[in-house]
Image (cartoon, coloured by chain):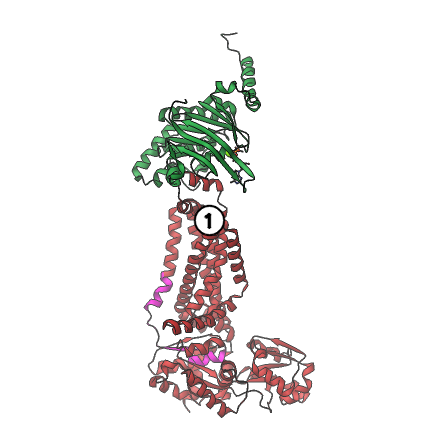
Chain colours: A green, B red
Amino acid sequence: MSDAPLMIAYADLDKSFDGGRVKAVDAVSLGVAAGEFLAIVGGSGSGKTTLLRLTNRLIDADRGQIRIAGEDIRTADPIALRRRIGYVFQSAALFPHLSVAANIGITPKLLGWPARAIAARVDELLDLVRLDRAAHRDRFPQELSGGQRQRVGVARALAARPQIVLMDEPFGALDPLTRDALGEDFRALHERLGLTTIMITHDITEALLLADRVAVMRGGQLLAQGTPAELSHSDDAYVGELLRTPRRQAARLAELLPRDDRA
Amino acid sequence: MNPFSDPRWGEALAHLPDYLGNHVRVSIAALALGLAVSLPLAIIARNRPALRATLLGFASIVQTVPGLALLALFYPLLLALAALSLQWFGVGFSAFGFLPAVLALALYSMLPVLRNTITGLNGVDPALIEAAQGVGMTPRQTLTMVELPLALPVMMAGIRTAAVWVIGTATLSTPIGQSSLGNYIFAGLQTQNWVLVLFGCAAAAVLALAVDQLLALVETGLRLRSRARAALGGIGIVALVAATLAPSWGQTKSSYMVGAKTFAEQYVLSALIAQRLRAAGLSATTREGLGSNVIYDAVASGDIDVYVDYSGTLWANQFHHSDIKPRAELLADLKLELAKAKVTLLGELGFENAYALVMPRARAEALKIRSIADLAAHAATLSIAGDYEFFSRPEWAGLQRAYGLAFHAQRTMQPDFMYAAAGSGEVDVIAGYTSDGLIAKYDLVVLDDPRHAIPPYDAIVLLAPQRAGDAALRAALQPLLGRIDIATMRQANLRAAGGDGASSQDAVARWLWDRIGQR
Ligand SMILES: Nc1ncnc2c1ncn2[C@@H]1O[C@H](COP(=O)(O)OP(=O)(O)OP(=O)(O)O)[C@@H](O)[C@H]1O
Ligand SMILES: [Mg+2]
C-alpha cells in the first residue's frame, strides 16, 4: 500500500482536553491510501473518536498536520470539508424530526442540489443500502429497527458522493447477525464506489475481517498498524493480547464445527 | 326573573367590541414584542451559562413584581423618557395607555419564553448537534434545521404560558389609560356592580382559553407533523385577531376624551360630561379607571381632554404644598399653578369631596364625640380605616399634628367596604369622603374639623392645553359649573352604589342631569 497515493495523512498529531490534562491523541502519524479500508481498534478512551473528529474538523488539533488528498485541512473551509466527507455516527444519530428521505438527502440539500436530483439520489441510496424505497422513504427514524437506522446512517453519509467515509462504531449496537450482514454490505459498497474508509470498532474480529489494515490505539498513541498478517507478527504485548481472543475463538470454532468432508 | 334581563348586561355588551379589541391589540403587541426580545436572547444565552443565569434571574425578579405595580411604574418612566426625547430630539410620544401597557406586559411575558426556550434548546441531544455539524451544517443551519425544531414543543409550552399571563395581566392596564377588559372589572369593583366584574373576568378567561387552545393546536400540529392542525390553529389565531381588531378599525377616533379616576363619583361625572358633550353634538369617549397619579399627567400632556379633580388633591399631591389655605385663596393659587402647565381650571362643580373622619352616629353620640378634637381623647382605644392612599397623604399627617391623634389600630381598605365596616362596628372610625352616599346609608356622621387641618376639596373641571380655547367644549360644560351641591352628589353616589339596573353610571348621570338641568 505504501506506493499508492495517500488520501489521508496524519503527521505527529496532538490533541488534549481540559487544559492539557487529558491527552486524547498523542503524536499520532498514520497514512491511509486512496481506496483503502482502515479499521481503528482500541479500548475505551484510547482516542479513536477524537482522531476521527479531527479528520473532518469537528475539532482542531493542538499540533501536527492532517492532509487530505495532499491538502492541509487547516486551509480548507470546515463546512465545505464536512460536506465532502461522509460520517457515520455511533447509533446513527438520525434527525428524529426528519423523514428517512430528508435525513438521507440532508447534505445534498445543504449543497443546494435541486429537489428532483435529491429525490432521485435518495432512491438510489435506499437501493444501495438495501432498504425498500416505497416502504422506508417517508418513515421517521423512530419507526425503524436498529439495523435499518444504521443503513439509513450509511446512506446519509454517502449521499453527496464523498470519496472518504468516516465511521464511528457504526455497527456497535446491533445483534451479531445484522452486524455481520451490514459489515459485508458496506465492504461491498466500499469496493464498488472506490471509497477510502476509516472505521472505528471495539471488535478486533470485525476489524480483521473487514479492513485492509488495522491500526491499534492505546492512551492516545498509535501502538501498531498493519495488515492482519503484519499485526500477527507484532511483538507488542497489547497487540498480542488483542489477537489472542479471535485466535482462540477461531480454534475453538474449528473444533466445535467440524466440516463433514474433513471428518 | 331572568338574570339576563338586567339592563347592565346590555350595557356591558355594548362596550365589548371596544374593550375586547383593545385588550387583544395590547396583548398581541406585548406578546409579539416579548417574543421578539426573548427568543433571540434565549438563543444567544443557551450556551453561555453566566448570561443564561443573569437573564433568568432578571426575568424571575420581574415576575415577582405585582402586575399592577409593574404597569404603574412604566407610566412615570415613559413620561420622563418622553420629556427627554422631546428635549433632545424634538419628538415626544404619548406615555399614556398603549405604550406603557405593551412594554410592561412584554416584560412580564419574558420569563416563560426565556426559560422554556433555553430548556428546550439545552435539552437537544448533543449527539444530534454533532451529527448536524458532521453532515455539513453551518451553526445557523444547525440552529434552524435541528435545534429549534427539536426544542419547539417545549418552546411552544412557554409561549402558551406567556400568552395566558399576558391576557390575564392586561386587565390591569386600565389604570394607566389602556382600555381593556379590565375596564369592566375596575368599574364594577368601584360601583359594586358585580355583573360587570363577572362579565370582565369571564371575557378575559374565555379569551385566554381560546388563545391557549389555538396555540395548543399549533403545537400538536407541529409535534405530530400534521400540517392541517398547525394551519387550523394558525388560521384560528389570525381570525381571532382580525375579528377583534376589525370593529376598532372602522371606528373614527373620538374627538373628546373624558377621563375618570377609579371611584364611583368619577365614573358618574365622566359619564355626565360625555353626555353633555354628545348633547352639544360633539363626540366623546370616556377613559375610565385611571390611577390618580396618571390622570393629571394625562390631561397635562393632552392624552385626555377633560376630567374632574379636587382642589386639595392637586394642591397637596401634584404640587406638593403642605400649607392649608382658605378655599377661595387655594383655588386662585391653584389656577396659577395649573396655568404654568397650560392646564385650564374651567370652574367648580359646586360640591366638595373632602376627606373626613366619619363614625357611626350612635357610637359618636354615646361617646359625646362631635368633632375631631373630641375624638382625639378617645383615639387610643379606637381603630381607624382609610383607603389605599390616605395614610400616606399629607392630610393624615396634618390631622395627626393638629389634633395629636394616635389610634389603637390602623387599617387600609377598599373604599366601598370601608363604610360597611364602620356600619357594622368592625372599625370605629373611617377616613371617608364627604360626598359619599354611603354616609347616609349606614347612618354615619362626619366629624367637624375645627382647626381646619383638612384642606378644601372643591370638585373642579380641568381642560387639556389643546382645549384651552375650545369654545364648543366650554359652552357644553358651562351648565354643569356651580350646579351640583353636596346633597345631590351624595344621592347620585348612593344610586351609583345601588348594585341594580338603575345604578349604571350612564343612568345615574342622566338622573343627575335631570336634577340639575332644570334649575
Ligand atoms: N470534548 C472533550 N472534552 C474533554 N475530554 C474529552 C473530550 N472528548 C474526548 N475527551 C477525552 O479524550 C479521551 C479520548 O476520548 P475518545 O472519545 O477519543 O475515546 P474513544 O477511543 O473514542 O473511546 P470509546 O471507545 O469509549 O468511544 C478520553 O479520555 C475522553 O474522556
Ligand atoms: Mg468513541
Q: Is mark 1 within 8 Å of ligand 1?
A: no
Q: Quadrant of the C terminus of chain B?
A: bottom left
Q: Position of residue A123 (x, y in %)?
A: 34, 32
Q: Which residues are magenta?
A: B242-271
Q: Secondary structure at mark 1?
A: helix
Looking at the image, which residue is at 51% across and 68% down? B68
Q: Do we see residue A121 in this rendering? A: yes
Within 10 Å of the Cα at label 1, are there few (<14), some (14-19), or many (20+) other Cα atoms? Answer: many
B111 up-or-down from A43: above or below:
below
Q: Position of residue A189 (x, y in %)?
A: 38, 26
- Res B338 → quadrant: bottom left
The answer for which chain carries disc 1 is B
Q: Do we see residue B442 in this rendering? A: no
Q: Amino acid at mark 1?
A: Pro
Q: Is residue A250 left or right of residue B302?
A: right
- Judge by depth and name the residue closer to the eye, B180 or A11: A11
- Judge by depth and name the residue closer to the eye, A28 or B28: A28
- Judge by depth and name the residue closer to the eye, B413 or B310: B310
- Res B344 → quadrant: bottom left
Q: Is residue B392 magenta?
A: no
Looking at the image, which residue is at 69% across and 81% down? B381
Q: Is residue B253 magenta?
A: yes
According to the picture, the residue beneath numbered tag 1 turns out to be: B153
Label total for image: 1
Q: Position of residue B238 (x, y in %)?
A: 37, 57
Q: Position of residue B146 (x, y in %)?
A: 43, 44
